[in-house]
Image (cartoon, rainbow, N blue to C red):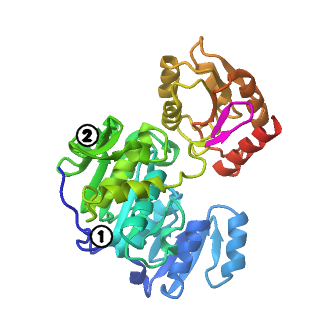
C-alpha cells in the first residue's frame, strides 16, 4: 500500500461546493455559539466580512464578561436566548452537535458549521490533520518538528496551540483535531493521520458508536492520503467497517514504517536506531512512525534522508506533562503524565516504565468510563501500589485485584507522601490519572503543578 507522496498543496483534497469558507460569509448574518478561545477566534475572523455577527452563550460567566469588554455592541452577546434573523451558525468545537440551539437552527434550514470547517475549506490542500483517542498531540508535534527541520516553514495549531482561525498564513500546516472538531467537518485535510481509537467523551457524543463515527468523519470527505496505526485493531476494524474502499498506509506493519530489533525500519530496510527518538514507550515509537509516514506521503523521502531524519528526531523535546521524569534525591523517579485522561493512556504509561517497581497515582473526574482494561492490566502486571486521588480514585482502588496493594489519598500531597512510603529505592511514582482534572483543578497543567509542589514539600 506504499505510494510515493507529493508535496502538500500540489494535489488538493476534495471539497464540496457547499463548503463554507470565511470569505463566503460576506453579506451573511452570523451567529457565533460559544464565547471561549475558539469563539473569540471566530469573531476575529468574521469581523468586517459578515454583514453582522452576534454571539451566544448558555450562561453568564467570565468568558461572557470578557466578550462584552472586547466586542461591546460591535458583536453583541446574548445569553440563553435564541436570536432570529440568522443565515449561518458557527459553533465552537466544545458545543455538542446535539445542542438544542444548533438542532433548532438546522431544522429551520439555517446553515450550521464550525470554525474548523471554515478554516479547512480554504486550507485543506496544505494541511496534515492528526486525530486519535491518544497520541495526537505527540504525533502532531513530531510531524511539525520534522517538517520544520527538514522541509520548510510550517505552522502547528488546532487542538494544540493556536485555534485554526487564528493561525498565520503559511505554506503548510499541521493541525491536531479533537473528536469535537472532526464531527463537524465537511472537508478532509489533504493528509489524515489516525493514531488510535477507543471510547472517549461519550457524554458529549452520545454513544460509543457515535464517537467513532464523529472521530472518523475526518476521512469521509476525500483526503489525498490516510495514514493509520495498524497496530490498533479497533481503529483498523472501524475504518474497514465504515470505509470499505479507503486506501491507507498501515504504519506499524512490516511493509510500512515500524520498529523492530531496536531499529526504525521501512519494510526490510533499517533506517536508524530506536534510540534516536528521545521518548519512552512503544506507543511513542509508533507515533514517530506515523510522523515519518506523513512526511514521506508529502514528498520528503525518509529512505533517502535517513541520517538527517535521525538527527532531527534526536532534537525533539518531549511535550510537557507527558511522561516527564522528575528525579528525586530519595532515589525515586517521579513521572508527570498529568495529560493522561483515559485508562488506555495510563496503561501505556505503565508499559513505558516496565519492569521497574512502580506506584500509580490515579483518579479525577468520574465520567463513567469503563476502567476494566486498566484493572485487567494491573491484574496481569501487579505494581507496588495504586493510590486513588480525589474523585474517581477511591472507586478505582476498590475495583483493583484483591492482591494489589492500594491506598486512598485525601489530596495530592497525601498521595505523594503515601507513594514515598510504598515505593522502593529505584522505583517509579507515576501520576497518570486516567481521568480529567475538571472539578479539582483548572486543567491538567494545574494538576501537574500540584504534583510537583507535593514532591518538593514531602522531601
- Which residues are the magenta region? 325-335
Residue at the disc numbered 1: 8
Q: Going by the picture, which residue comes out furthest to the top? A: 403
Q: Residue at x 59, y 39 (%)?
A: 435
Residue at the disc numbered 2: 253
Distance between the alpha carbons at the discs numbered 2 and 1: 25 Å
Tag 1's secondary structure?
Answer: loop
Q: Residue 199 carries which label?
A: none
Residue 210 appears anywhere in the view: no
Residue 1: x %, y % from top left: 17, 49
Q: Which residue is drawn at 67% across and 73% down?
A: 67
> Could you tell me if the residues under marks 2 and 1 are in contact, i.e. CB atoms within 8 Å?
no
Residue 171 lies within the magenta run = no
Q: Residue at x 49, y 31 (%)?
A: 351
Residue 329 lies within the magenta run = yes
Residue 280: x %, y % from top left: 49, 40
Amino acid at each position: 500500500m506504499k505510494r510515493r507522496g507529493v508535496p502538500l498543496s500540489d494535489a488538493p483534497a476534495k471539497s464540496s461546493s457547499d463548503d463554507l469558507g470565511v470569505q463566503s460569509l460576506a453579506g451573511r448574518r452570523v451567529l457565533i455559539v460559544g464565547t471561549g478561545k475558539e469563539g473569540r477566534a471566530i469573531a476575529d475572523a468574521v469581523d468586517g466580512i459578515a454583514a453582522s455577527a452576534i454571539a451566544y452563550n448558555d450562561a453568564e460567566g467570565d468568558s461572557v464578561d470578557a466578550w462584552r469588554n472586547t466586542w461591546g455592541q460591535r458583536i453583541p452577546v446574548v445569553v440563553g436566548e435564541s436570536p432570529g434573523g440568522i443565515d449561518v451558525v458557527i459553533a465552537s468545537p466544545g458545543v455538542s452537535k446535539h445542542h438544542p440551539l444548533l438542532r433548532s437552527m438546522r431544522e429551520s434550514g439555517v446553515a450550521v458549521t464550525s470554525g474548523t470547517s471554515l478554516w479547512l475549506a480554504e486550507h485543506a490542500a496544505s494541511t496534515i490533520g492528526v486525530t486519535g483517542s491518544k497520541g495526537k498531540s505527540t504525533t502532531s508535534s513530531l510531524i511539525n518538528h520534522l517538517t520544520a527541520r527538514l522541509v520548510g516553514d510550517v505552522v502547528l495549531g488546532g487542538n494544540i496551540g493556536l485555534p485554526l482561525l487564528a493561525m498565520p498564513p503559511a505554506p503548510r500546516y499541521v493541525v491536531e483535531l479533537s473528536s469535537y472538531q472532526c464531527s463537524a467537518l465537511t472537508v478532509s485535510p489533504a493528509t489524515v493521520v489516525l493514531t488510535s481509537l477507543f471510547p472517549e467523551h461519550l457524554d458529549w457524543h452520545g454513544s460509543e458508536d457515535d464517537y467513532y463515527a464523529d472521530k472518523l468523519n475526518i476521512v469521509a470527505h476525500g483526503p489525498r492520503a490516510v495514514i493509520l496505526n495498524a497496530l490498533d485493531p479497533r481503529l483498523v476494524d472501524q475504518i474497514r467497517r465504515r470505509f470499505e474502499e479507503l486506501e491507507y498506509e498501515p504504519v506499524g506493519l512490516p511493509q510500512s514504517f515500524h520498529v523492530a530489533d531496536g531499529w526504525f525500519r521501512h519494510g526490510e530496510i533499517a533506517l536508524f536506531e530506536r534510540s534516536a527518538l528521545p521518548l519512552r514507550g512503544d506507543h511513542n515509537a509508533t507515533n514517530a512512525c506515523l510522523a515519518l509516514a506523513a512526511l514521506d506521503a508529502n514528498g520528503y523521502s525518509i529512505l533517502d534522508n535517513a541520517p538527517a531524519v535521525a538527527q532531527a528526531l534526536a532534537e525533539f523535546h518531549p511535550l510537557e506533562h507527558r511522561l516527564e521524569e522528575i528525579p528525586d534525591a530519595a532515589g525515586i523517579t517521579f513521572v508527570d503524565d498529568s495529560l493522561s485522561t483515559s485508562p488506555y493512556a495510563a496503561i501505556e504509561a505503565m508499559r513505558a516504565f516496565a519492569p521497574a517497581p512502580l506506584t500509580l497515582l490515579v483518579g479525577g473526574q468520574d465520567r463513567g468510563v469503563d476502567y476494566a482494561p486498566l484493572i485487567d492490566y494491573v491484574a496481569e502486571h501487579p505494581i507496588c501500589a495504586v493510590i486513588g486521588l480525589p474523585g474517581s480514585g477511591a472507586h478505582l482502588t476498590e475495583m483493583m485485584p484483591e492482591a494489589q496493594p492500594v491506598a486512598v489519598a485525601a489530596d495530592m500531597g497525601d498521595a505523594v507522601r503515601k507513594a514515598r512510603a510504598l515505593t522502593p529505592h529505584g522505583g517509579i511514582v507515576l501520576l497518570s490519572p486516567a481521568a480529567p482534572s475538571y472539578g479539582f483543578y483548572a486543567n491538567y497543567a494545574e494538576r501537574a503543578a500540584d504534583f510537583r509542589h507535593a514532591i518538593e514539600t514531602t522531601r
